[in-house]
Image (cartoon, rainbow, N blue to C red):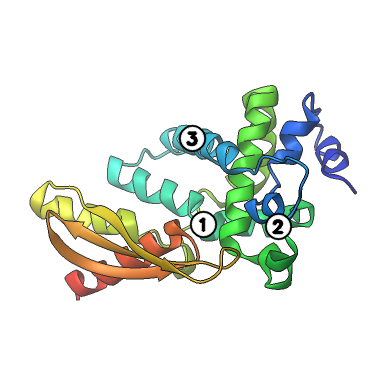
Amino acid sequence: MTIFEWLESKNIHVNNHDLINQAFIHSSYVNEHKKKFEDNERLEFMGDAVLQLWSSKQIYNLQPAMHEGQMTTTRAQLVCEEALAGYVTELKLNEFLKLGVGEEKTGGRNRKSIMADSFEALLGALYLDGGMEPVDIILNEVILPKIKHPATEATTDYKSKLQEYVQSDHRKTVHYELIGSKGPSNCPEFEVVVKLDDIILGKGSGTSKKRAEQNAAKNAFEKLVV
C-alpha cells in the first residue's frame, strides 16, 4: 500500500503528491541520494503549529472547562514526542518513511524522534494541501479517543510541569540551551541545560533536541520538588 492509497482509505484526497511524499523524507535520505530531494523539516515546522492549534481548540471545548495550567499540561501530553510516535505506530505510518541506508540499519524507522517529526510533517503537508479537513480526519482518529485520559509516566510533559512550578513562586520563565551534541549524523545525541535566569536547574540528553529538553526539565523538576 502506498501513502496515497492509505490516505484514500481515510477518504482523504490529495492534490499535491510531491508535498505528501516530502513529509516522509528524512534528512539521511536526502544526504544519500544525488537526485535533489527536500527533507521534511520545513513541513514539520508547519505541522507543529497546526497540531498546537487543533489540540488547543479541542481542549478549550472540553467540559467541564479546564483552567489554563490544566489546558497547557493536557495539550503537552497529547503532542509530546512520545505521544506522536505512538500515533505513528498506531497508524503504521512509519512504513512510508524514506531513510538513508545508515539510518535504516540503526533502527531509524522505529526511532521515536523520527516518527514524531514525520507525523508533524504529514499534518503540515495535509494542511497545505487541503486545509484543516484532512487534518481533522487523522487527529479525530488518534487523539480524540485519548483526550480525556490521564497521562502515563511515559507521556508526562516535564517542560510544562517545571514551568508551572517555577511560575507558582517566581512568575518567571525557564529557558533551554543546547550545550553540545555528539555521535554520527544518523544517530546524534544532544545535551541541553535548563536555566532560570543564569542558574542551571537541570541537564538532560536525548536523540532529539525535544527529548533532551524534556529530560533536562525532568531532571530539574525532580530536584526542585523532592
Residue flagged by tag 1: what amino acid is it? Glu
From the image, tell me which residue sits under label 3. 49
From the image, tell me which residue sits under label 2. 90
**Quarter occupied by residue 158:** bottom left
The residues bearing labels 2 and 3 have C-alpha atoms spaced at a distance of 22 Å
State if disc 3 and disc 1 touch (CB < 8 Å). Answer: no
Q: Nearer the viewer, residue 137 or 219?
A: 219
Q: Residues within 10 Å of mark 3 (few under 14, many from 20)?
A: few
Q: Nearer the viewer, residue 94 or 136?
A: 94
**Quarter occupied by residue 102:** bottom right
The picture places residue 209, in percent across and down from the top left corner, at: 43, 58
Residue 135 to residue 103: above or below? above
Residue 215 visible in the current orientation: yes
> From the viewer's perspective, is 211 left or right of 37?
left
Of the two numbered discs 2 and 3 on the same chain, state the one appearing first in sequence: 3
Of the two numbered discs 2 and 1 on the same chain, state the one appearing first in sequence: 1
From the image, tell me which residue sits under label 1. 81
Q: Residues within 10 Å of mark 2 (few under 14, many from 20)?
A: few
**The C terminus, quarter of image:** bottom left
**Quarter occupied by residue 44:** top right
Q: Secondary structure at mark 3?
A: helix
The residues bearing labels 1 and 3 have C-alpha atoms spaced at a distance of 14 Å
Closer to the camera: disc 2 or disc 1? 1
The residues bearing labels 2 and 1 have C-alpha atoms spaced at a distance of 14 Å
> From the viewer's perspective, is 19 left or right of 158?
right
Q: Secondary structure at mark 2?
A: helix
**Residue under the image location 79 percent in, 23 percent down:** 15
Q: Nearer the viewer, residue 21 or 165?
A: 21
The picture places residue 9, in percent across and down from the top left corner, at: 86, 39
**Residue under the image location 75 percent in, 64 percent down:** 101
Q: Secondary structure at mark 1?
A: helix
> From the viewer's perspective, is 129 left or right of 165?
right
